[in-house]
């Protein structure tokens, strides 16, 4: 079994009654006139679980619920913490590194563009020094070929935040209670295992009773990373024609942002861009034998939308009565109030039209973190996120969901596909000052790292969408070697492979590379190691052969442990 629970731990609990605030530090179960605090441990094979329960005897506001462990963190050379949502930079690091954060130099930019809304910056206050890490839902420490995995078994009661303090040899597991009021049993359910990667993650998902997804890997085309909001009927027709000439048809053709007159006004289709409407687009896609997909951001609305003019009471309000900002996109956008029945009725109607009247078979649902924004007196952020995903599943029914911008722990078993990284950019990593801003920023390099770092979610919680690969020569600032890294990493680690290129513009070499990338051949990843900060070594099996991929993500040559020197921005793949 995991030795984690053999180490000393203390339950730190702060709560408020009508008359006073109390703090308890508990090393054993406890009971008084206000509450009971109990926990029990189950062990099976290499795994162990801890179930902590608070039973209030009168209504309480929970202000803090932590488990604090003494643990030899510094004996583990590497660490992984899962970021707040899909876009958050999440990959293995040296235990001596530090997580990036919004720099003080970017404060003015953040005040303008509200970067902090995309992440956990407004409600998680963690030490930013080297050796301090925090993540959501799960984390692990690695030593050689084994990991010590820590995972939540229940995010519905609140997000579980794993804080790893290497300099202090401490691990603190926070339940994000956010002052929630409780009058019935409330708890924290945790899972620990020390094993190889596959055994550990299989055991964790089994303990959560999450069944493996039944859908298959797919490939396709999406409009966003070439045309962005400048999409129209002619562009779609041109790309449909190009896709029809392929020897293997596209599984999915997905229309992204730009078809609607405003975000939130989903049924108001731009009559200039799509004069025949969206049913005609879906019909044309289906006529080619592909599944039509459509992008929506159901939990947000842009400030200029007609929806706000007609229904300002549908927008979530902050503690000052102002609209709850969800981000800066489209000139600023706000979170919808999902507790409002009229909002839910409106969204049900939108999905009914999109899926049944227009005939789309997949919806890409974006900015899903917005369901956890703001404060609710009796529901935690995690509960609201989980309820938001339940609601979407009930709306979409047996059609497919591609989640994006989502808090991943509440999507497990609720979506068929999910983005596990940020948006790919048309360059590699943007100018240097981009690295001063949020961990959710658009970045090809971070998309590549996330595709590798979150590989263990694929075929377990959902099928991984690493975002697009791009091979074209125009409207892009990546080198050919950078494009090859992106394509090969998506091919190795992704199960939903999209491009936004106009395939008919490809030359012969690009067509061959596209065919190889989109082949969806079965692969078995044996190991992933990081011999240097910007270097990744992957050993895997494909077509009954053993392969080694050496990836240099930096602008300098890197010498790998096998003696090979890999030039900047290069992936070198060889049979072993």
Image: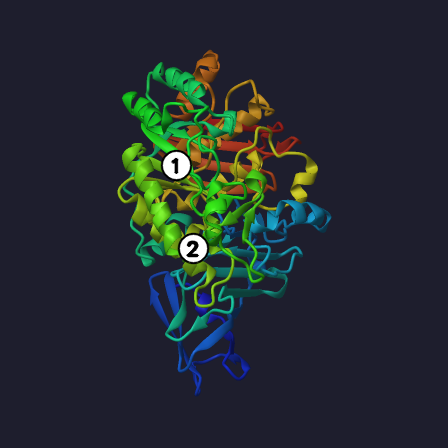
Quadrant (top left/top right/bottom left/bottom right) for the C terminus: top left
Report the disc number at residue 234. none
Relative to residue 107, is residue 375 depicted above or below?
Answer: below
Report the disc number at residue 267. 1
In this rendered view, identify the residue nearer to me: 186 or 485.
186
Residue at numbered disc 2: 385
In this rendered view, identify the residue nearer to me: 330 or 249.
330
* Circle 1 Cα neighbour tier, 10 Å, few/some/many (<14 / 14–19 / ≥20): some
What element does badge 2 sit on?
helix
In front: label 2 or label 1: 1
Q: Residue at x 59, y 65 (%)?
A: 169
Q: Is residue 513 visible?
A: yes
What element does badge 1 sit on?
loop
Numbered marks: total: 2
In this rendered view, identify the residue nearer to me: 493 or 395.
395
CA gap, disc 2 to disc 1?
25 Å
């Amino acid at each position: 079994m995991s030795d984690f629970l053999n180490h000393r731990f203390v339950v730190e609990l702060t709560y408020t009654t009508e008359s006073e605030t109390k703090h308890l530090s508990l090393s054993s179960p406890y009971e008084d006139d206000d509450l009971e605090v109990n926990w029990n441990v189950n062990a099976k094979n290499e795994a162990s679980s801890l179930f902590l329960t608070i039973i209030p005897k009168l209504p309480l506001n929970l202000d803090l619920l932590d488990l604090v462990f003494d643990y030899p963190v510094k004996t583990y050379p590497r660490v992984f913490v899962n970021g707040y949502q899909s876009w958050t930079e999440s990959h293995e690091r040296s235990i001596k590194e530090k997580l990036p954060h919004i720099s003080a130099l970017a404060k003015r930019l953040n005040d303008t563009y509200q970067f902090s809304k995309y992440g956990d910056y407004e409600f998680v206050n963690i030490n930013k020094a080297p050796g301090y890490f925090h993540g959501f839902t799960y984390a692990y420490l690695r030593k050689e070929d084994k990991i010590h995995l820590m995972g939540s078994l229940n995010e519905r009661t609140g997000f579980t935040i794993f804080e790893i303090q290497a300099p202090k040899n401490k691990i603190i597991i926070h339940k994000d209670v956010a002052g929630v009021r409780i009058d019935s049993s409330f708890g924290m359910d945790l899972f620990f295992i020390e094993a190889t990667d596959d055994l550990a993650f299989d055991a964790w998902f089994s303990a959560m009773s999450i069944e493996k997804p039944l859908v298959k890997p797919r490939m396709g085309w999406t409009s966003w990373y070439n045309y962005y909001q400048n999409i129209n009927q002619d562009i779609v027709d041109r790309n449909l024609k190009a896709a029809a000439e392929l020897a293997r048809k596209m599984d999915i053709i997905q229309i992204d942002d730009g078809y609607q007159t405003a975000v939130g006004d989903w049924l108001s289709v731009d009559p200039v861009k799509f004069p025949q409407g969206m049913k005609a687009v879906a019909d044309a896609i289906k006529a080619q034998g592909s599944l039509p997909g459509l992008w929506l951001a159901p939990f947000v609305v842009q400030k200029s939308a007609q929806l706000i003019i007609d229904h300002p009471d549908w927008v979530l309000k902050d503690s000052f009565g102002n609209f709850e900002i969800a981000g800066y996109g489209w000139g600023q956008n706000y979170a919808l109030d999902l507790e409002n029945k009229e909002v839910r009725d409106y969204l049900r109607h939108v999905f009914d039209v999109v899926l049944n009247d227009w005939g789309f078979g997949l919806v890409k649902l974006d900015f899903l973190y917005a369901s956890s924004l703001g404060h609710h007196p009796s529901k935690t952020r995690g509960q609201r996120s989980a309820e938001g995903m339940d609601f979407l599943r009930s709306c979409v029914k047996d059609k497919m969901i591609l989640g994006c911008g989502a808090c991943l722990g509440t999507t497990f078993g609720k979506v068929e596909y999910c983005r596990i990284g940020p948006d790919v950019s048309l360059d590699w990593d943007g100018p240097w000052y981009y690295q001063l801003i949020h961990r959710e920023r658009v970045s090809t390099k971070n998309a590549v790292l996330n595709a590798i770092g979150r590989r263990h979610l694929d075929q377990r919680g959902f099928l991984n969408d690493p975002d697009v690969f791009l091979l074209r020569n125009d409207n892009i600032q990546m080198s050919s070697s950078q494009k090859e890294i992106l394509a090969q990493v998506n091919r190795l680690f992704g199960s939903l492979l999209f491009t936004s290129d106009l395939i008919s513009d490809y030359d012969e070499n690009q067509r061959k590379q596209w065919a190889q990338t989109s082949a969806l051949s079965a692969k078995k990843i044996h190991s992933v190691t990081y011999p240097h900060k910007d270097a990744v070594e992957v050993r895997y099996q494909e077509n009954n052969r053993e392969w080694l991929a050496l990836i240099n993500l930096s602008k300098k040559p890197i010498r790998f442990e096998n003696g090979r020197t890999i030039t900047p921005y290069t992936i070198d793949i060889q049979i072993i």
